Amino acid sequence: MRFLEHVRAESARLGEVARMGLDAAVPSCPGWTVDDVVRHVAMVYVHKVEVLKLGARPDPWPPDFSANETLAWYDEARAALISALEAAGTDTETWTFNPRDTTSTFWYRRMAHESLIHRIDVEQAHDVVTPIDTDLALDGIDEVLYPNLAGPWWEEGDTEYPIDATLRITAAGRSWTINADATSIDVQQGSEGEAAAEIFGDPAPIYLWLWGRVGEDAIQTVGDPNVVRAFRGRISEATQ
């Protein structure tokens, strides 16, 4: 499956760049160093190994990993994740946070994007950013919009960005139309209807902007800039 190859490649690059120095500050994660990013990713990988093993969220979690040497732990966690994904295949029933997909396929995709975004973090820290696969970036736009943003998280109106507008994203011939209010977000494929604002351009910078890895100057927009900024704030709440 192509997502597994992306997990392999992105996680390998992350580890390679991390070895350039763990003390470097990560621009997109204020207060974090490369060491913090690598330890975070190792923790995520180990957690998903347990999820795939149990078919459920491990409890209690997490164990105490504080004594683990960062790079050795990361390498072990990376190898364990790849082995766990291979063993699970793509049809194993398991816990996910996607109401529409409760199979191990979800974790193939999620770990590809987890690895990619944090690969970008450590590359930015060392000023050695490399390109992003276009198809993976397009898929990443799709994934951050659902389930990360438009899952059932907003029913209580618990947001600092109670945006009430329609926004559209267009990249490489694909469009997503997002209808948002304080208690719900609905994402539809396509470009039907009016929108208060539109974000458009190449897939990679849009993907990185959605994840807060580049600023607004990296994307192109038309329409109400306040809607664009409020939308980005809402995504930041959904992806913390």
Image (tube, grey):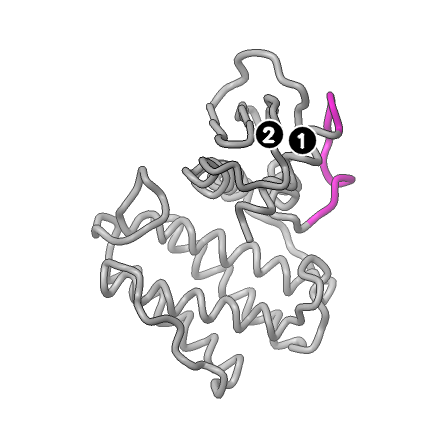
- Image point 30% across, 68% down: which residue? 59
Q: Which residue is mark 2?
A: 171
Relative image position of residue 231 (x, y in whole percent) = 63, 34
Q: Which residues are magenta?
A: 214-225
Position of 42 relative to 98 (above/below): below
Three-letter amino acid code at the position of disc 1: Gly
Q: Disc 1 or 2, which lies upstream in sequence?
A: 2
Disc 2 residue crowd, few under 14, some 14–19, many 20+, Cα 10 Å: some
Relative image position of residue 151 (x, y in whole percent) = 43, 38
Q: In terms of depth relative to the viewer, which is nearer, 83 or 67?
A: 67
CB-based contact (under 8 Å), mark 1 and mark 2: yes
Secondary structure, mark 2, is: strand
Residue 70 located within the stretch drawn in magenta: no
Relative image position of residue 146 (x, y in whole percent) = 45, 37
Q: Which numbered disc covers residue 201?
A: 1
Residue 36 is at least partly visible in this image: yes
Task: Specify the quadrant of the image occupied by residue 197.
Answer: top right
